[in-house]
Image: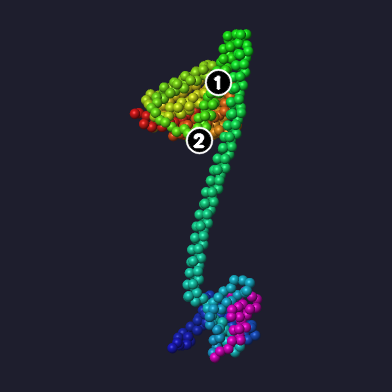
Amino acid sequence: MQKDLSILFPDWSDELKATLLHNNSLCIALFSADKSLVFANPAMTSLFKEEEPWKNILNPRFESLAASTGTGTLVYSGFLTIGSLSTVNASIQAEVYKKNGELLIIGGVDASQLVSQNQILHDLNRDISNLQRQLLKEKQALVNTLNKLNEANTELRDLNTTKEKLFSIIAHDLRNPFVVLLGFSEMLKKNVHQLSPDKIQQYANNIFNASENTYNLVMNLLEWSRLQKGLINPTPERVKPGQLIEEVVLSCEQLYSSKQIHLITHVDYVSYMLVDKEMLKSILRNLLTNAIKYTQDQGNITISVQRQDDDLLFVVSDSGVGIESHLLDTIFRLTNQPSKTGTKGEKGSGLGLTLCKEFVEKLQGKIWVESEPGKGSDFKFTIPLGTADL
């Protein structure tokens, strides 16, 4: 049998009253018979939303509690909803007592409520965390998709640029040499008996130069087209770099001799390398003809090769016009910008340098250029030796 608190705590009655009245976990309210609020502690007051306190008792409603009858003073025990219909409400575990027309409401949150609410919050946090992870995954998927779309757009732009450039080459760069060929050959045909030997030689040289330029351009177009279709794959063979350079220099002799260019070769590696011979020849031929094109009469061109660890470094240097800095990053790309004319008005498509880059990369090497306007250019590329010393 429980004892009266005043008997258990005879000297603590004031403290117990203060604690009960001001406890934030215990809600206490006393209403008079005419619905007026006689007393409400801070915990209960914090739940009131309506201006008239009795209207805050929502479920069961205040009127129902006030009309309840029983054999004792306890008229209700259970969950009591307090607040406003237009706001978020609170439910407490409460007991309602009725005596002399007054209602005493005492209640709070019991342990089971706290456990249940904590579990709900835990589950909610878990669901939110799962949702956040899912959103992050979806965001990353969207970012990846956008990146792929950007890459696809870039590829489409490059393809359009390439298409426009190829049309330009076919429509312009191939047309012009044939105009020269047809023009000089027609003059020779009509006037061969009236022309001096020197004039005939001049026409023949012009026809030869136009034919050679056209042939080189057509070969570059064919090689580049086969590269794009994946029809060209390296076929390595044992090659002496020095001999290969001599072959390339000999094939371009007429071009650099006509401009009285001094051409020097430095070969510091005399052994074999394992490489696709035709690809390497195409790279060197295009770099050499490009150097000849932009080098003035009586200028200098040097072709050198030396070993660097497991690679060979090839350098084609010229004393020509050089390249502006803003063009260095685009010089190996096929763009729709017209190629700069040579020192004697030589035309070019820009396809040769693009082909060089793609061939070097096919051979697992790297290519770059160092240049300043008016100070010439150094085109450099590396090719792995492979099992060259067999």
Q: Which label number is shown at residue 211?
A: 1
Q: Position of residue 297 (x, y in %)?
A: 55, 18
Using the image as rendered, state which of residue 278 and residue 125 is in the foreground. 278
Q: Which residues are magenta?
A: 46-71
Quarter of the figure with residue 182: top right
Give the distance between the C-alpha atoms of the residues marked 1 and 2, in whole angstroms: 27 Å
Residue highlighted by disc 2: 229
- For the C terminus, the quadrant is top left
The crowding category of the residue bearing disc 2, from other C-alpha atoms within 10 Å (few below 14, some 14 to 19, many at least 20), is: few
Query: What is the three-letter code of the residue carrying label 1?
Result: Ser
| Residue 22 can be seen, yes or no | no
Quarter of the figure with residue 21: bottom right
Q: Number of numbered discs present?
A: 2
Using the image as rendered, state which of residue 60 and residue 138 is in the foreground. 138
Residue 139 drawn above or below residue 235: below
Q: Is residue 73 left or right of residue 305?
A: right
- For the N terminus, the quadrant is bottom left
Q: Secondary structure at mark 1?
A: helix
- Residue 207 within the segment the image draws in magenta: no
